Image: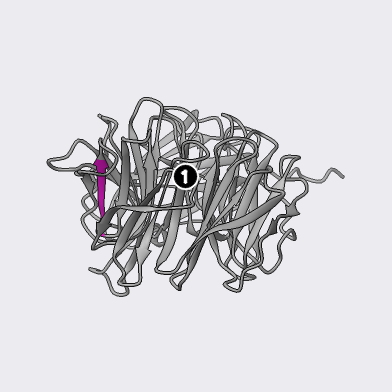
Amino acid sequence: KTLTILLTSLIISQNVLGQVAHDSVFVNNYFWSNCFTDTVNGFVVGDNGAIYKTLDGGCNWSLTSSGVDGRLMSVHFPSSQIGYVVGRDDITSSSIVLKTLDGGISWNLLNTTISVNDYFTSVYFLNDSVGYVCGDYNTIMKTSDGGVSWNLQTIQSSTYNPQYNDISFVNSDTGFAVSGTGSWPSTLAKTYDGGNTWQLDTIFQAYSLNSVHFFNANYGYACGYDQALAGVLLRTTDGGVNWSTVNNSSSWIKDMQFKDSLNGYIALTSGELLFTANGGSTWSTEYTFPQPVAGASIYITANDEWHLAGNSLDYSTVPPSYLGFTATSRECDNTLNADILIDPDIFKLYPNPASNNLTISFEPLVNEFQVRIFNVYGKLINTINNVQSNDQINVRELSSGIYFFEIQNVRSNIYFFKRVIIEKYSTPQN
C-alpha cells in the first residue's frame, strides 16, 4: 500500500449489507462537502481543517494537511490541479479560503481579511481564475484572479440579512444562490451579469434552503425544509420565478444533485440517499447510513457513480462521538474491516521532532503492533514487528525530513498514521 498523504484518524470501511455501495466511517470527524475532479480523484472536507483525498473513486481516503483548524464547508475544483476550499475559523469566526495548485497535495491560505466578520459556506469557480463564494450576513464575493483579490457583490437590499448556503452558475453570466439558516423566510438570489449585481428573485416565506442546482437559465432544483421541519424539493422551469413541490419528506433534505432534468439524488437527515429517474415522480433507496445525519453532500461523476459525504453522532458513547462518513456506488474490493474503535489520540510518538530515538506509547487495549515507516514519496523505509507500549524506535539512520509511521495491529485490523519530523543536528566543529 503506497502512502502519499497523512491519515490521522481511524477509518472503518465496509460493504453495506444488501446494498450496492461501499462506505467508510471516520471517527472524530465531521464532513460537509465533497468534490471529484474525475472518476477516481476526489475530496471531502470537514471540521478541524480536515481535507481527505481519494485516488480510487472513494474506496480509500487519506488526510492531507490543510494548515488550518476550522470548519471547512465547501470544496470545488475547476480543473484537475487547481481547487478551492472555504469555511470559517472556529476561534475568530472569520472566513477561510484555501487554494491548491498541485491537485490537493498542498494547500495555501489566501487572504482571510476579505470578509473579517463573516464566514463562507459555499464556493464555485467557473474556471481556474473566476469564482464566487457566499456565506453569512448577506455575503456574495467574486474573484477574477484566482483568489488574490475579492470584490463584494451588490445584492438587492433585504431586511432578512440571509446566510447564503449554496451558489452555482450555468454560464459566465447567469448564477444562483439560496439562503436559509433555520429561520424564515429564505431567498433565491440571481445574477445575469456575471455577479456584478444580484436580485432577490424569490422570497420563500415557509422554507429554509440548503442547495440549488440549475441546468440552464430556466430549469433548476432547490432543496431544504419547511417550518414543520419536513424536507422539501422544489423545481422551477422559468428561472426561479415560480416553483413547484417535487418531493415532501418527513426528514430534511440536506443536499440534492441531478445528472439531468430527470435523473437525480437527494440526501435525507434520516440517513437515506434516494434516486429518481423521472424527475421526482417516484424514488428508490440507493443507500442508508445506519443512523440520522446532520449534514450531507452528493457528487455524481461522469461515469454515473454517486458519492456521498456527511456527518453524524454516535450516541453509544458518552459523550457522543462525532462521525464523518463517505459512501460510493463504486465497487471496491480492498475493504478494511475494523473490530474495535480506538481514538488515535491514545497513541503517542515522542519526541517529535526526533533525531535518534522515538518512544511509542499507547493504552493496553491490545498488546503488540507492527510499525512501518514511509517517506513523503510513499516508499517503505523500514518495518518493525512486535512493538509494545513504551518501546523505543531507533531513527538514527533516517535522514532529516518528514516521515509517516503506520501503526497496525493485524489481529484487530486497527491501523492509523502519525506524521513525524526527523531533524539531524551537525556537531559544531572546533
Q: Quadrant of residue 344?
A: bottom left
Question: Where's the C terminus, which quadrant?
Answer: top right
Q: Secondary structure at mark 1?
A: loop
Q: Quadrant of residue 59?
A: top left
In the foreground, 405 or 1 = 1
**Relative to residue 251, is residue 296 drawn left or right?**
right
**Number of numbered discs overlaid on the protein picture:** 1
The reply to whether residue 111 is visible in this rendering is yes
Q: Residue at x 54, y 55 (%)?
A: 49
Task: Give the residues drawn in magenta, as a range.
Answer: 270-275
| Residue 403 falls within the magenta-colored stretch | no
Position of 227 with respect to 180 (left or right) is: left
Q: Residue under circle 1?
A: 238
In this view, 62 is above or below 352: above
> Residue 335: where, in percent of width, then height?
26, 36
> Measured along the vertical axis of the image, is residue 103 above or below residue 179?
above
